[in-house]
Amino acid sequence: MSAVELRCNVAAPGVPLRHVWEHTVGSGHAPLALRADYQRQLARCHDELGIRHVRFHGLLCDDVGTLACELDKLVYSFFNAFQIWDALLASGVRPFVELSFMPATLASGTTTVFHYRGNVTPPRDKGAWATLIRTLAQQSVARYGEAEVRSWFFEVWNEPNLPAFWTGTQQDYFMLYRHTAAALKSVDAALRVGGPATANDEWIDDFLDFSEKSGVPADFVSTHHYPTDAFGKPGDDTEAQLAASERSVLRDRAHRVRGQARGKPVYYTEWNTSSNSRDPLHDEPYAAAVIVKTMLEATGLVDGYSYWTFSDIFEENYFASIPFHGGFGLLTLQGVAKPSYRAFEVLHHLGTELVASLTDIHPTVDAWVARDPDARCLTVVLTNHALPHHPIAGEHVRVRLEGAPRPTAAFVQRIDADHANAKAAWLAMGSPTYPSAADVEHLHDASRLSREPLSWHADDGAVLIELDLPPHAVAAVTLTIGAPVSTT
């Protein structure tokens, strides 16, 4: 096992570490929010991970019943939508409202997406669409109050640059956006609306040109990116796409989008370690390493980074039954935390200052040092990550923290093949499709983060820590100190 040497001056000024990964999390389909198990899992993500908003598809679909035509008259019903929003608010999170898909009575065509048949065609009557949005906003403000609804975000549609989600042209989308923004602002000019909600960071310049030239408000820019986007060749499987990707592609794309955004807030409203809803890596420590690396590399680049999704309670193609089936979620159907969930738990407990980013130094090992002045602690977060088919090995890491006060305690939390890895425990029990209550309790135990004491020593004004880091691993070393941490 080779050795990696890292050093930083922790007495140096830090930069703000905004927990952008906590702003929003994704979920598949609006009616799922009416399930009791969904609500329990969402409340847990709020309480344990600090999640503040949730975004999902299909609020305006026919199965929610927001708009119907009865005896040649349009009938509005927001009862189900409000039940959904009530459930979110009761869980401690607010909506990041994706305004989709097209109610059948307004649709210009019959093309649909997913098993619940969300209609993806433009409205045949833009005025009727605007009336729907205006009425929804009016009733929302009346029910929840101006101050509450102003804290929400209204995003127009989902991935209109992909034929699977929008049969119209770019100009058709811009007209939809124009009518939507006008309808929302007519109710309250302080309601936040944005887009273009595109896949693969596309249309951003075009969207902002349209907004500026037409005088149409755009309060934020939203887009999506997955590491599998635009890599590999047609017909490649997910592993081949990832192998052809770039190690810090999400950081590099976010940097480009920040430059395109013209000073507007940037929200990535979808991302995951791949765009495949049946990717085995979603359930494994690999995902945890990608998440920690991606989120900390996003410092200063984005205002929100929404992981898709918080739960495997998800049904775009069909509802799975196998606990570890490669789903997008942080939690399994049974609510067992995957390594990805534990990655967000590590991130949640970081401080508010980023002291050092020790990245691009080693082919697979990266490190960050975060400071929490209130809790009087420093945390060194380490990842060992490589894309599939790229070289990776276990590494012995030595970190020299120059200027660090003497710790009063030190512990490490690990996510790797042998730690916080519930899938490994499930495989060891024979991979039951329907685990018993006792099995699930065992999986909960296997998923937990543990605090292991870690030795350290002082040397010439520095604190030295050493540990082994397996492939596709996260290790968070927290040092508690007995006096306030210097920030000057």
Image (spheres, rainbow, N blue to C red):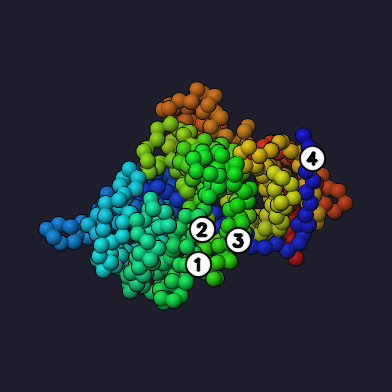
The residue indicated by pointer 1 is 205
Label 4 SS = strand
The residue indicated by pointer 3 is 255
Q: Do we see residue 415 in this rendering?
A: no
**Which residue extends farthest front?**
234
Q: Nearer the viewer, mark 3 or mark 4?
A: 3
The residue indicated by pointer 4 is 3
Q: Amino acid at mark 1?
A: Asp
Task: Identify whether 434 is placed above or below 77.
Answer: above
| Residue 256 position in % (x across, y down) | 59, 62
The earlier-in-sequence mark between 3 and 4 is 4
The earlier-in-sequence mark between 4 and 2 is 4
Question: On the picture, is 14 further left or further right than 152?
Answer: right
| Residue 231 position in % (x across, y down) | 55, 47
Question: On the picture, is 485 further left or further right than 195?
Answer: right
Q: CA distance from mark 1 to mark 4?
A: 45 Å
Label 3 SS = helix
| Residue 159 position in % (x across, y down) | 42, 56
The residue indicated by pointer 2 is 201
